[in-house]
Amino acid sequence: MARRPAKTKAARAATLAAPTAMRIGFIALTDCAPLIVAKEKGFFARHGLDVTLVREPSWANMRDKVALGALDAAHMLAPMPLAATLGAGGWKKPQITSFVLNLNGNAVTISAKLWDRLVEAEPALLYARQESANVLRRVIAADRKAGRPKLTFATVFNYSSHQIQLRYWLASAGIDPDRDVNLVVVPPPQMTDRLAAGEIDGFCVGDPWNSLAVLRGVGRILISGYEIWNNRIEKVIGVNRDWVERNPLVHKAMLMGLIEAAEWLDRPENRLEGVEIMAKPDYIGPEAAEAIRLGMLGVVRYGLDVSPEAMPDFFVFNRYSANFPWRSQAEWYLTEMQRWKLIDPTIDVAAIADCVYRTDLYREAAAALDRPFPLIDRKPEGLHAGPWTLAQASAPITMGADLFFDGSYVSSARAMSTAARMNAEPSAIAIRRPSANR
């Protein structure tokens, strides 16, 4: 169990002696909201930071600029600092995260044309959306038999939560994502236009782009990320490890501002103001305002022909200890990347999670603000259908549901020796899945 950070006057000190300039990158997605709010509402300034927010066009661009030092920190996909530290998909640059921006927020969306084909194959799908992956498998099999081209699905980056979620969901129905479909990478803001143009048949992306596809009448949401795995870490703040070593107080001040911004966002009375801020031209833009509003208010519009459905946890910014970088979730991402041969199958999963997901630095920032924080680094995932209390914390914390849609669960990779992990199949490492899942 982790030690509690010392609550001395020095440990509580938050404001830097003089305003310190920072450049932080973001992608136009609703889940960059804590960064935008921390800037716009003065939370960064309160802790002595003069932050310039830089909108980037793609995750690859973001990765490269952080690695080169052109950005001090960035809005990142949860697997990105893990992949960068391992040198997967680019040059090797040790990175860390000590702050989770949000839980949930993604969805799998398909074109209106493909949705019509699925309903034609199984009319009951109109009332049993949970069967969509199985019906998609039947359509793919029919296409293969008829010699038609494979369907094309887009994700935002090869080392992304979206890539992993889409693969996981497809495989649950017996669809091989490497053989049965084409997977391509498309930057998030381009997803809806590419779908409308017929260049892709579906995508997995963060909002507002799923909701916007529905509102434009070009897409249909099949399943949300929350439904695939309740309250999964989605985006984080990523920084180079050597930058943190050179700038520990600046890093701590950034975390403190973000904690306060995330708290502000999770107060229901602030969500509509948050929508107005996010819809400014410098951030996501007014054309997406209604799509931003849906997600921020916890509403999912699966299609124009069905009533919106309440999903209060579609975006979680602070509650459930959302900002804590759980190493158990880092381990899940790593084992899934091993499963799909995206990273070396022999790496020490727990050791990488330990060096990249820096729970100790989060605790220091939370303690300085007198906020509760977990005293453990890992928790079982997939066991809770509703609220539960984390007692192993500086003060009891109410946590949210954490179920997987297929009944899987995850226990810590710490429970297995390094030798056992190296000799095990990646898909079996500390994970139980139904046999239908590859």
Image (cartoon, helix red, strand yellow):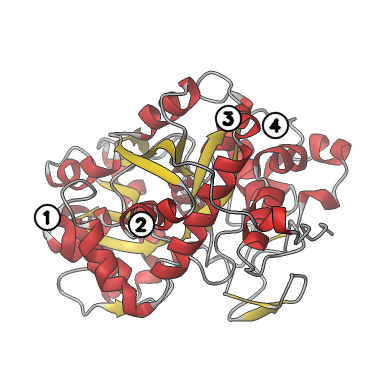
Q: What element carries label 1?
A: helix
Of label 4 and label 1, which has the lower sequence position? 1
CA gap, disc 1 and disc 3: 36 Å
Nearer the observer, disc 4 or disc 3? 3
For badge 3, the amino acid type reads Trp
For badge 4, the amino acid type reads Pro
Q: How crowded is mark 4: few (under 14 residues within 10 Å), some or many (20 or more)?
A: many
Q: How crowded is mark 2: few (under 14 residues within 10 Å), some or many (20 or more)?
A: many
On the image, the x and y values in percent for residue 146 come to 26, 41
CA gap, disc 4 and disc 3: 29 Å
CA gap, disc 2 and disc 3: 24 Å
Task: Say the numbered circle drawn on residue 287.
Answer: 1
Nearer the observer, disc 1 or disc 3? 3
Nearer the observer, disc 2 or disc 1? 2
Image vertical order of residue 320 relative to residue 134, above or below: below
Nearer the observer, disc 4 or disc 2? 2
- Residue hosting label 3: 243
Residue 119 visible within the image: no
Task: Say the numbered circle drawn on residue 33.
Answer: 2
Of label 4 and label 3, which has the lower sequence position? 3
Q: In the image, is 127 to the left or to the right of 340?
A: left
Image vertical order of residue 281 relative to residue 238, above or below: below
